Image: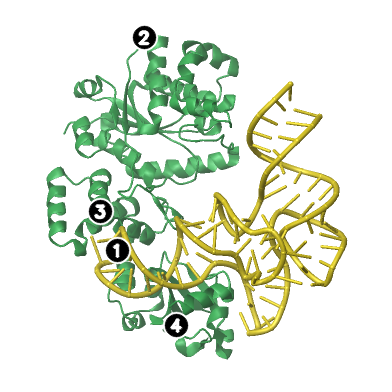
Chain colours: A green, B yellow
RNA sequence: GGGGGGGUUCCAGAGCGGUCAAAUGGGACGGACUGUAAAUCCGUUACUUCGGUUUCGAAGGUUCGAAUCCUUCCCCCCCCA
């Protein structure tokens, strides 16, 4: 299927430079997307860009993933209302390594002419001196042009101002595009809609410097139906790295999508075809409470990001925690199985000897573990009916726990509200 | 340089000598309802050995008693030059 048409029906096309679709139709074309090393893992927001790159590859084109070893040292002002702090080089390198590893797991690097490549713009900037840069790059773009960009204009109008460093960012990114165009025959840059200004500086630069032609496609910013920011939960960002967001939490994130969002996300984040999606949506509407759509969405993405075995565990955990998984079920499991099910759920340990003499709930929840920050808070939560241990609601805030309360002589399952689980292990 | 306003509990924002752990709104978290949804309703939102203890930019002072008055200091904002 035509790449541009595919983006269009999936709702992934925000802006496209005239002529782009025609250029892609002529045959295998190289395009790139840049990833900022602001953290050592990518998050669900960048997943969209990774998948775009993958769709691009599946459409027969050659994808480049650019990691911003150089641009990360400058800081993209787009969408930021204030100057950012610079990352130290140590952190930057650590982040770059993490991101590179993640990118490698999605793209195909061994499929002939359109094999993916990862490039780091630090490679062509590290030996580029300041004077060379202002003579060879700076000369082709006017300050007037740069100041007209929204990202710059907004900051110039505000009181916080903008440093020369961040002002120069678009030129650095523009030069990236030129470099890839010149040396890798890469004629297309893609990205989020906030990148449009930076991308166009690149195409403009290519045109003015070498009279070349280059293209741009941006995707819309993903928003939830209720207008709040996508990719965040109470617990913070949803990351692709299992160390930061467990597969279970990751699965839950998608499962919890509202109907409207799920319908959107499944187009954006999966490779189901248009007709498959229409079927799924229709099925979902006949029985919305079964949430088929959310389940299909969550399973597909979790498998892609974490793998099938991790999805299995996430499903088992979900079944137990939200289904009719009873305590009896848990009692039948051995220690390893219990730990597997509770993978991705906060763990705490408590001294078995101390349990012999008894630990009262408040001490247990606030001091022996960090489930609550203070005894007062634990108490209020218990009085409000918000705490269960081993699936039994705690009604008495002076209850004392002893080894007889342990499941399999080892575990206590604490629930804060309905959705927040904690595992306490006695050792 | 001159004049004025202000810094309050997660945020916004009342309080202006005791009845103030501090109104109200938002957010957050819990409960009910439900589809692990939305909307709605209800509760909680400093710590505590439940006797008290530490909070209202910081440090001192006045007073039986201060977020509220005085002094000094720090930081923000506005107007005039």
First in residue order: circle 3 vs circle 1: 3
Chain to which the residue tagged by mark 3 belongs? A
Q: What residue is shown with label 1? A: A312
Per the model, the C-alpha gap separating discs 2 and 3 is 45 Å
Question: Measured from the top left, where is residue A215 in percent x and y?
Answer: 31, 21
First in residue order: circle 3 vs circle 4: 3
Question: Measured from the top left, where is residue A104 in percent x and y?
Answer: 38, 42
First in residue order: circle 2 vs circle 1: 2
- Dot 3 lies on which element? helix
Q: Is residue B10 above or below residue A70?
A: below
Q: Nearer the viewer, mark 1 or mark 4?
A: 4
The residue lying toward the viewer, choosing from A9 and A65, is A9
First in residue order: circle 2 vs circle 4: 2
Q: What residue is shown with label 4? A: A394
- The residue lying at 29 percent from left, 22 percent from top is A17
Question: Measured from the top left, where is residue A282 in percent x and y?
Answer: 12, 54
Q: Are marks 3 and 1 on the same chain?
A: yes
Per the model, the C-alpha gap separating discs 2 and 4 is 73 Å
Per the model, the C-alpha gap separating discs 2 and 1 is 54 Å
Per the model, the C-alpha gap separating discs 3 and 1 is 15 Å
Q: Are marks 3 and 4 in contact (CB under 8 Å)?
A: no
Residue A139 seen anywhere in this rendered image of the structure: yes
Q: Are marks 3 and 1 in contact (CB under 8 Å)?
A: no
First in residue order: circle 2 vs circle 3: 2
Per the model, the C-alpha gap separating discs 1 and 4 is 31 Å
Q: What residue is shown with label 3? A: A297
- The residue lying at 55 percent from left, 32 percent from top is A73
- The residue lying at 59 percent from left, 85 percent from top is A354
């Amino acid at each position: 299927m035509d790449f541009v048409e595919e983006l269009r029906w999936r709702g992934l096309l925000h802006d496209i430079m005239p002529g782009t679709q025609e250029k892609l139709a002529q045959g295998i074309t190289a395009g790139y997307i840049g990833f900022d090393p602001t953290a050592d893992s990518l998050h669900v927001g960048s997943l969209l860009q990774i998948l775009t790159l993958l769709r691009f590859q599946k459409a027969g084109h050659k994808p480049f993933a650019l990691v911003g070893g150089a641009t990360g040292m400058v800081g993209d002002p787009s969408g930021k209302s204030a100057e950012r702090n610079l990352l130290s080089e140590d952190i930057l390198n650590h982040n770059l390594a993490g991101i590179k590893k993640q990118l490698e797991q999605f793209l195909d690097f061994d499929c002939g002419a359109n094999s993916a490549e990862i490039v780091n713009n630090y490679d062509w900037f590290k030996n580029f001196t300041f004077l060379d840069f202002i003579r060879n790059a700076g000369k082709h773009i006017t300050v007037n042009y740069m100041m007209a960009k929204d990202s710059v204009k907004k900051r110039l109008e505000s009181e916080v101002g903008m440093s020369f460093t961040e002002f120069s960012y678009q030129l650095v990114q523009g030069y990236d595009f030129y470099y890839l165009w010149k040396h890798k025959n890469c004629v297309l840059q893609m990205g989020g809609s906030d990148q449009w200004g930076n991308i166009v500086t690149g195409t403009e630069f290519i045109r003015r410097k070498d009279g070349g032609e280059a293209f741009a496609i941006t995707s819309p910013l993903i928003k939830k139906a209720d207008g709040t920011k996508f990719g965040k939960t109470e617990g913070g960002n949803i990351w692709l790295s299992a160390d930061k967001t467990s597969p279970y939490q990751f699965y839950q994130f998608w499962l919890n999508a509202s109907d409207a969002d799920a319908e959107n996300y499944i187009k954006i984040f999966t490779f189901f075809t248009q007709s498959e999606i229409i079927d799924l949506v229709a099925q979902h509407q006949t029985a919305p409470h079964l949430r088929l759509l959310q389940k299909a969405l969550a399973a597909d993405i979790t498998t892609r990001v974490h793998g099938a075995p991790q999805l299995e565990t996430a499903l088992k955990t979900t079944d137990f925690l939200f289904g009719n998984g009873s305590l009896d079920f848990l009692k039948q499991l051995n220690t390893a199985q219990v730990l597997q099910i509770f993978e991705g759920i906060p763990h705490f340990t408590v001294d078995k000897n101390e349990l012999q003499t008894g630990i009262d709930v408040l001490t247990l929840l606030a001091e022996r573990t960090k489930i609550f920050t203070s005894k007062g808070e634990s108490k209020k939560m218990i009085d409000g009916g918000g705490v269960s241990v081993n699936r039994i609601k705690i009604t008495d805030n002076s209850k004392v726990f002893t080894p007889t309360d342990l499941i399999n002589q080892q575990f206590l399952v604490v629930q804060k509200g309905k959705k927040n689980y904690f595992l306490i292990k006695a050792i």
